[in-house]
Image (spheres, rainbow, N blue to C red):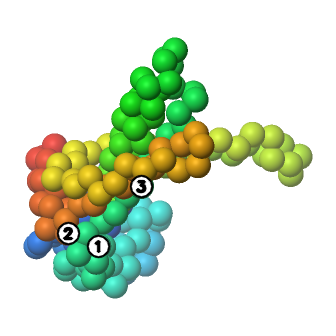
Amino acid sequence: MQATKLISIALVAIALSACQGATFQKLMGDLAPDDAAGQKSGRGERPAMVRVPSELLVPNLPLVEKRESLTATGYAVISVQNSKTPAQQRLMAIRAAKLDAYRSLAEQVYGLRLDATATVADMVVQNDTFRSKVEGVIYGATLVSITPSGDDTYETTLTLDKSTVQDLRMLYLTQLTAKSR
């Protein structure tokens, strides 16, 4: 359980390391970087699967790179919308495309949680499944365009300023550290 918690903190720290002042050293507490897996570091024993390379301990590692904003595009099919009138189907498709774009922004800001399971029997894959989940708050996004794409699809594009991304990540990191105490 402790190893799972540490791995979760490390993954979130990687995703949120662009926040001002947030470093892995602050988040990981007494874990030493680059200790050999499972060796005693004098600060406690680290589980074999947790290893934080020192290059990831650089403070303020930019995840948004040099871009001034994040851009996300969402899509929705008109004909599958649950309505009898074509006008309402179009409006519902626009709404769905906008929500898809917001989901894409949330993935870029907070990352994506991916759970995967594979079953192998007699050296043959029997079952291979995965689920993804994204959770977060997006505010301050600007609607760039809503355009028809082909005969039966709408495309919506949103942008999010880099400073807003930093604010969102900082708020998320603050909430995360408050919950772990």
Residue 96 lies, with reference to residue 104, above or below; the image says: above
Q: Amino acid at mark 3?
A: Thr
| Crowding at mark 1 (Cα within 10 Å: few <14, some 14-19, many 20+) | some
Q: Earlier in the sequence, mark 3 or mark 1?
A: 1
Q: CA distance from mark 1 to mark 2?
A: 7 Å
Q: Which residue is mark 2?
A: 162
Question: Where is residue 122 drawn, in percent x and y?
Answer: 89, 46
For image coordinates 86% across by 51% down, the residue present is 123
Q: Which residue is mark 3?
A: 73
For image coordinates 25% across by 69% down, the residue present is 69
Say which element carries label 2: helix
Q: Earlier in the sequence, mark 1 or mark 2?
A: 1
**Which of the two discs, 3 and 1, sits closer to the camera?**
3
Q: CA distance from mark 3 to mark 2?
A: 17 Å
- The answer to the question of whether label 1 and label 2 lie on touching residues, with beta carbons closer than 8 A, is yes
Question: Where is residue 78 drawn, in percent x and y?
Answer: 53, 33
Residue 33 lies, with reference to residue 140, above or below; the image says: below
Q: CA distance from mark 3 to mark 1?
A: 17 Å
| Crowding at mark 3 (Cα within 10 Å: few <14, some 14-19, many 20+) | many
Compared across the picture, whether 144 is left or right of 175 comes to right
For image coordinates 86% across by 48% down, the residue present is 124
Q: Is residue 166 visible?
A: no
Q: Which residue is mark 1?
A: 64
